[in-house]
Amino acid sequence: MRIVVAGSIAYDYIMVFPGQFKDHILADKVHVLSVSFLVESMKRMRGGTGPNIAYNLALLGERPTVMGTVGEDFSEYRTWLENAGVDTGLIKVIEGDFTASCFINTDLSDNQITAFYPGAMAQAHRQRLPLDGHRPDFVIIAPNDPAAMAQLVIECQTNNIPYLYDPSMQAPRMNGPELLAGCRSAAALIGNDYEFAMMAEKIGCTEEELHQVVGLTVVTKGGEGATIYQNGQVYEIPAAKPTIVADPTGAGDAFRAGFVRGYLAGLPMPVTGRIASLTACYAIEHHGTQEHRHTKAEFMARYEENFGAEPLLAELFG
């Protein structure tokens, strides 16, 4: 199956603050906020929603294609993705610019403050989906340049290509009509509980009504698992248990990869959700978004450890 993952492609600068942000923010002074956090570590890691999702799909047996724009500093990253089993044929280099960069500061309670420089990502709206012999069977519209996301929605709708709509972290930059346009024809809509509340408010509906706009919606809840709504049915998905909580960055992207893998395989929603939950768990246990690895046998064994035996997994990975 040809899966195109269209999303941001970035380098993540991951920092850890050895305290809690809330202890240094005065509630009565937030209107004149001026804070500085001395971090104890910083690493430059490969990231971006597109490659993060694609990397996890590759671990789960797919060979997805990443679509996006990058700068002249991307060559090492491209080699990494190809070696991981990800097709980079739809990644375009923008001469004279840098690959987008995300600066992520995480405190000891896993709260995050993030700054994002788009760089070459600002040109992503100029790309188009291939419609010849490489026409995708499914597209993941992940957070990216908002104009690029809107363009992809139009292309998928015009050409009857099913897609997962994931505005999530870009929802604050998008207005109600833009969000509603992306939701209307989506095969599935995904975001965390805060993002769903924001999208519903911008669209001008309740969260319950938003679940009715798209036949399949997924609300992630961090350590509390996730809830899947499908045509009136509600499935509560438990969180898999990590051996260690090293870094939550990238867990959401990993969850999306696991969800898409199970969904496209036609698995029942409870199984699909648990695959997604376990995929996210691997990301949480490592610093960085693409530093974890697992074999199919290891994944199946850990699924059974967390959720019990599931014969359908053997068929999925067979």
Image: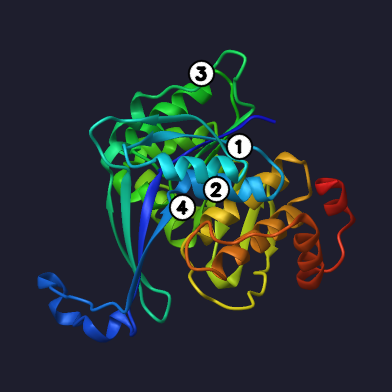
Q: State the CA–CA distance, disc 3 to disc 2.
A: 25 Å
On residue 53, the disc is 2
Q: Which residue is mark 1?
A: 64
Whether tag 2 and tag 4 are in contact, CB under 8 A, the answer is: no
Q: Which residue is mark 4?
A: 206
For numbered disc 2, what is the local secondary structure? helix
Earlier residue among tags 1 and 4: 1
Earlier residue among tags 2 and 4: 2
- Left or right position of 271 against 130: right
Whether tag 2 and tag 1 are in contact, CB under 8 A, the answer is: yes
Residue at the image position 71 percent from the left and 60 percent from the top: 274
Whether tag 3 and tag 2 are in contact, CB under 8 A, the answer is: no
Q: Which residue is mark 3?
A: 158
Q: Quadrant of the N terminus?
A: top right
Amino acid type, residue under disc 3 in the picture: Thr
Residue at the image position 31 percent from the left and 41 percent from the top: 175
Residue at the image position 48 percent from the left and 43 percent from the top: 50
Q: Position of residue 98 (x, y in %)?
A: 27, 41
Whether tag 1 and tag 3 are in contact, CB under 8 A, the answer is: no
94 shown above or below 310: above
Q: State the CA–CA distance, disc 1 to disc 3.
A: 22 Å
